[in-house]
Image: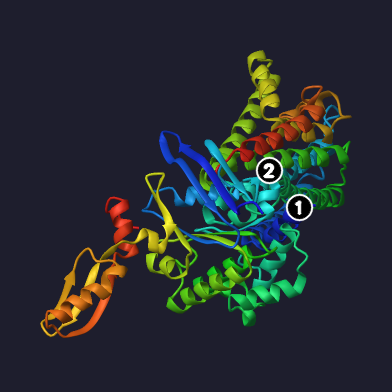
Amino acid sequence: MPPALTTRALVKRFGRTTALAGVDLEIEPGELVGLLGPNGAGKSTLTKIACGIVRASGGEARVCGARSGSRRARAAIGYLAELFRFPDWLSAEEVLVLHQRLASSRGGAGERLDLLGLVGLADARRVRVSAMSKGMQQRLGVAQALVGEPRLLLLDEPTSALDPAGRRTVRELLERLREREIAVLLNSHLLSEVELVCDRVAILARGKLVASGAMDELTQARGLEVETGAGVRLIKEVGREQVPQVVRELVAAGEEVYSVRLIRSTLEETFLELTGGDRA
Amino acid sequence: MNAALIAFYAFRETLRRRVFLAVLVLTAAFIALYWLGARFVFSKTSGFAGNGVVDANVVRGATIFGLALFATYFLGCVLAIFLTLGAIRGEAERGLLQPLIARPVGRSSLVIGRLLAAVLVCAPYVAIVYATCLAITRHTLHWTPDRQIEPLLALMLAVAIIAAVSLLGSVFLTPTANGITVFMLLGVGMVAGLLGQIGAALKIHSLERIAEASSWVAPFEALYQRALFALTAETSGMTKTVISLGPFGGPQAGPGQLWPWSLAYLALATFAVLAVFARLDL
């Protein structure tokens, strides 16, 4: 099975501004990848190229083996734009009917009920978009993106308008998508959210991919926090393997050890380090 | 198939817009005023038999129905512009376009669908207003244009061209800027038409050439003049001369290839939208 998304030396220029300066990224089927980067790093541009609404200036992007933007590639994706709106006179169910038709989905009423249930809008299927809160519209947007059983879901800031409960719903939804083998590219400013749900993180800065890997690979061991009778102190440059040795030495030195905790850098610290201190 | 689906939803949205309701109310007001005006004109001039050189009934009917034609053309254009001025950039800025474009729907389907929806609203609208005014004219002024179908077809095609031009503008401009631009284009066309009318009356060839050139650049105005011309196409002599100085533009048959050129212009404008939109980053 080809990767859900592959970009090779992907370049995008808007006039004199280079939004993407040669990005190589690969997302495997069923993988959940978080895309991080400060404002203007090129996250949305990359997502838009993947779904075919922006054309690349160089390099290539392929979705499930098909050139991005092609009919085959667009049939394989679900997309939730950062800024989106549905006709406000349509009900939740009518929005999904429209997208089922556009996606040539044969899921019918069953698919609509399933998706509305998945995003917690089962009771709001007849509610018009104009009567929905921003959060409800955002969840409807996620349901819309899932119409037609996409193999790659491109989510551009899907939780930006959601309250904590709504964010939790989306997180749980992403977990369930993992079970359905749907690959997800999650473009988000919320590092904690990415940390909680993603298998892997890709960090963009100034149009370049500056880091990519699993959470453990991106964060670094910072040392061991030890609580003894003398108080809490940090012993630097200690990895997991050295913990028993350190504890033995402390006990041998006559100290009473109450707790030990390995300290790793947070994703936020790694992010700030890699992006030169710009905030996401 | 997808174009029909987009057209269907765009059509439904159009009917739900308040602007459409406003147009309906204003159109009803215009028709009522036209009926009243036609009645007053008839009652005040029914005793006027003409001087044997000028047919008073034709002058009265053609002038008043010329007003109806102008209003039908203008209202049809207003509707066409408002339905399309924000179709691409405006809807992209509002976030309505992105969920549709990401689907396996050709961008061409979206353009054709939007144009189709606008024409499906505007053309019947023009036909209804035209037919109503024609019925009022017949009933109150007892006058019937020499040709009845040709003016209607000319107006419908003119409005379709305006919709296509406005759709093209919507790819480049924000809705407000596009609306202003297309209205100004409409105004320039009208001015060129009036210059041609003055040129023809005073035999100033340079003005006539300007009007002719504008017929190629803005065939919607030439079609409107053609519609006016068709009202009294079989009329001749002094009556025709008097009518040609009417206040709503000079009736001109226009260039010989007006119909094929207008259809080609509509097709070219549509292809231009397709070509530009296909390369547009959203």
B205, above or below B180, in the image:
above
- The answer to whether the residues at label 2 and label 1 have Cβ atoms under 8 Å apart is no
Circle on res. A170: none
Q: Chain of mark 1?
A: B
Disc 1 packing (10 Å; few <14; some 14–19; many ≥20)? many
- Report which quarter residue B196 is drawn in: top right
Q: Chain of mark 2?
A: B
Amino acid type at mark 2: Ala
| Whether residue B125 is visible | no
Q: Which residue is mark 2?
A: B163
Residue A177 in percent (x, y) is at 59, 69
| Whether residue A92 is visible | yes
Disc 2 packing (10 Å; few <14; some 14–19; many ≥20)? many
Residue B152 in percent (x, y) is at 82, 42
Circle on res. B2: 1
For residue A194, side relative to residue B205 (left or right): left
Circle 1 — which element? helix
A40, above or below B235, in the image:
below
Observer-nearest residue: B146 or B265? B265
For residue A211, side relative to residue A147 (left or right): left
Amino acid type at mark 1: Asn
| Residue at the image point whose x is 77% and y is 22% from the top | B255
